[in-house]
Image (spheres, rainbow, N blue to C red):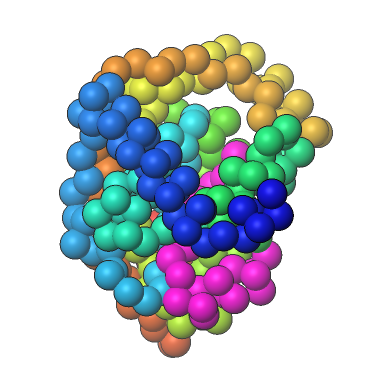
């Protein structure tokens, strides 16, 4: 069993099989499209910054499409609560999902990989709405990572993401206080509606050493 877990071909086959299933679901159920796939590099590092919907299903779809079309994997930063869930260890190992620190993220990029970060994280997932306002709360970690690793940032956004999965819409203040106390998702969501999903992959924002982390955050958010 240990030999299987360290077999690179085993993981590659497993990832492509899962990617094919996710991509089929994306096409059939959501008519999923990616606009700007040419902005995903064939080789080399890049930091993908994306808006976090109630469920980041669009990133599952995008990663699957990139695995199948470009034979590349997007490494992903996930919230720490995920790693307490049963079975998550195997999933995170297969798809290179980690909690991430600035230094570990820089290391991933310096190894030539693509990395996806949602600055809004679970807070944006829980308390965003159909106006799609960025809820980054002055988070600068992604900007520090990009500047230290000297890599381009590729912005991503998925149309209709909040129409597919939604928050309950009541008792918002109560659930916000509860979330701030326990730091795990507590706001009920519902959905799975078969709406059209379209992910827009923006042109890379090239590394600019003259920018501060604050300046880069504003540039990406603009």
Name of the residue lying farthest toward the bottom? 210
Q: Identify the image quadrant of residue 122.
A: top right
Residues 27 and 168: in front is 27
- Identify the residue shown where x is 42% and y is 58%: 73
- Front residue (pair 12, 19): 12
Image check: 208 left or right of 149? left
Q: Which residue range is magenta in the image?
A: 101-122
Q: Which corner quadrant holds the C terminus?
A: bottom left
Residue 173 position, x and y percent, is: 66, 22
Whether residue 121 is visible = yes
Q: Position of residue 164 (x, y in %)?
A: 36, 22
Q: Is residue 94 left or right of residue 52?
A: right
Is 108 placed above or below 51 here?
A: below
Extreme residue in the right direction: 181
90 in relation to 148, above or below: above
How many discs appear?
A: 0
Asked if residue 6 is among those painted magenta in the image, a careful observer would answer no
User: Does the magenta segment cover residue 112?
Assistant: yes
In terms of image quadrants, where is residue 27? top left
- Between 127 and 76, the residue placed more toward the observer is 76
Which image quadrant is residue 127 in? top right
- In the image, is residue 212 above or below residue 136? below
Give the residue at x 68% y 65%: 101
Q: Is residue 76 visible?
A: no
Image location of residue 209, percent across then percent down: 44, 87
Give coordinates of residue 22: x percent, y percent.
37, 34
The residue under the point 39% across, 83% down is 208
Residue at the image position 33 percent from the left and 39 percent from the top:
20
């Amino acid at each position: 069993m240990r030999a299987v877990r360290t077999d690179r071909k085993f993981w590659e086959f497993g990832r492509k099989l899962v990617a094919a299933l996710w991509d089929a679901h994306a096409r059939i159920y959501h008519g999923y499209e990616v606009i700007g796939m040419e902005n995903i590099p064939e080789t080399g590092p890049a930091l993908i910054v994306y808006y976090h919907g109630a469920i980041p299903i669009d990133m599952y779809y995008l990663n699957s499409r990139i695995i199948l079309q470009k034979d590349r994997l997007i490494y992903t930063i996930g919230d720490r609560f995920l790693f307490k869930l049963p079975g998550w260890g195997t999933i995170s190992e297969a798809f290179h999902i980690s909690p991430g620190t600035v230094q570990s993220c820089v290391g991933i990029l310096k190894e030539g990989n693509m990395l996806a970060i949602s600055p809004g994280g679970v807070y944006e997932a829980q308390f965003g709405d159909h106006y799609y306002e960025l809820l980054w709360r002055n988070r600068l970690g992604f900007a520090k990572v990009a500047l230290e690793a000297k890599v381009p940032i590729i912005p991503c956004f998925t149309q209709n993401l909040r129409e597919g999965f939604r928050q309950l819409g009541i008792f918002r203040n109560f659930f916000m206080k509860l979330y701030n106390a326990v730091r795990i998702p507590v706001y009920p969501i519902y959905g799975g509606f078969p709406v059209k999903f379209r992910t827009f992959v923006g042109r890379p924002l090239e590394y600019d050493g003259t920018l501060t982390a604050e300046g880069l955050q504003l540039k990406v958010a603009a």
